[in-house]
Every structure is written in C-alpha cells, then in structure tokens.
Image (cartoon, rainbow, N blue to C red):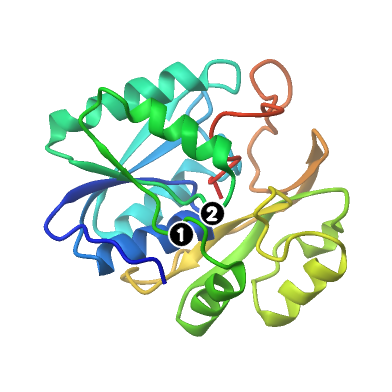
Amino acid sequence: MRRFSLQGVPFVCSWSGGKDSCLALHRAVAAGGILVKLLCLVREDGTASLGHSLPVEVIEAQAERLGCRLETCRTSWHDYEPAWTAALHRQRGDGIEAVVFGDLHIASHRRWERDACTGSGLRPVWPLWKERTSRLADELLSGPTRAVIACLRADPLDAALLGRELDAELLREIADAGADAFGENGEYHTVVIDAPLFSRPVEIDPVGRYLDGGFWHLDFGLVPPRGAGALRPTGGGIPRPSFE
C-alpha cells in the first residue's frame, strides 16, 4: 500500500461517487487526514454528476453517510477545466490544506490536477497512484465496500453488466471481455452504495438504461445528457472519472 501521511491535515476529496475516489478517501483518512468535504463536478442544470450521470441526490446521500459537506461545481465538458481550477482555488478559504484524487496510472490526468492546484495553496495527494489494481481489488472486495456498475463503454462491455455489484466473478468477466478489470482506462464507472466510513448504505433506484455517446448508463429517470455540453473530452483533462 502507498505510504503517505496527512496527519491532522484538513482535506477535500475530488469525488465522482465511484470506487476509486472512495478508496482514495478512505486511505487519506487512514493516513490521519481530516475529511472536510467532497467536491464534485455536476451538469449545468445541477441534476447529476458530470462524469457518471449519478443523480445529485445520490452524491448528497454519500456525503451525508460520510458526515461531511458536499460542494458541487456546475459545468459542462466544454468548460470544466477553468471551472474545476476555480473550484480548487476556493478551497483554502474553508481552511482546507490538501485535495485528494483517485487516479491510478494515467500521467496526463495527474499532471492536469497538479497544474490545476498550482497557486491554490492546496497540496495534491494521490493515495492510489501506481498501485497494482489487483491489490486495490483485494482491498475493495475484502471490506464492506459495495460498488455497482453505473456506466460502461459499449465496446467491449455488455450492457447486461449495468447494475451489477462488483465482486471477484464480475472482475473476471470484465477482464475476459478484454477490458481492464478495474476500469482504469475508463471502460466502466461505479457508484458506491456502502463503505467502511458510511454510517449506513445508500439506496439507488434505477428505472432502466440508456445509450449515450458509446456509453451505457443506468437510467435514474433523469433527462439523458444529450446535446450541447454533454460530450466527454477525447484526451487530457481530468479522469472521466475519477473519476472513477
């Protein structure tokens, strides 16, 4: 496990609602950090997260279970970079000293996040960086963390995987389909419904599924993010997500 210390350091977590940001958050707390808030990119209309299309009510429930505040940043894929940078630079005003990211291996994401923090007074921290995904999978599955697939790339994965809870068998199925079992290349994203620091589980209630931009999503009854402002970036920038 990556060794680092955040003893007594107030931090904000870059939050997607998925497994990677959740694992990073728990490692930061285990390293002595003090969780102050979650910071999440959401659609311009404020209804759902930008990366995973999760209802904001689900993200709010996760924050409530963690006993922390939630700050949302309304934006689109067309202008998220300056909006996200400005949001990070506001955090010192709340006494926050560090920001925790859930990236694993994609160097361009880490460079962008580091640059976005420049001049903010925040210390960027990557608790999962260069960790073996097999070790992270063991960490995820050995505890009470429960994560459900909320979004996946139509090629190479099957839409039937949507809504399934991650377990060892499902990770094998994903790898057998030719994808990274942990979704590090953006093959799929999850929503965490329970975790060690959650006071109780989060309930989700999808009503179906829809296909948008080559990705299958769980349908939570919101208007699908089609049209201007919905396109994901093709390279660079933040993880989709970390996302995850």
Kindly identify which residue carries mark 1. 128
Kind of element beneath mark 1: loop
- Tell me the quarter of the picture where residue 175 sits: bottom right
Q: Nearer the viewer, residue 126 or 18?
A: 126
User: Which residue is at a point 14% across and 28% down the rendered structure image?
Assistant: 93
Horizontal side, residue 80 vs residue 32: left or right:
right
Type of the residue with mark 1: Leu
- Tell me the quarter of the picture where residue 159 sits: bottom right
Where does residue 172 sit, x and y in percent of width and height? 77, 76
69 to 141, vertically: above or below? above
Where does residue 187 sit, x and y in percent of width and height? 74, 51
- Tell me the quarter of the picture where residue 233 sits: top right
Horizontal side, residue 12 vs residue 54: left or right:
left
> Where is the N terminus found, in terms of image quarters?
bottom left
Q: Residue furthest bottom?
A: 142
Q: Are marks 1 and 2 in contact (CB under 8 Å)?
A: yes
Mark 2 surroundings: few (<14), some (14-19) or many (≥20) residues within 10 A: many
Kindly identify which residue carries mark 2. 104
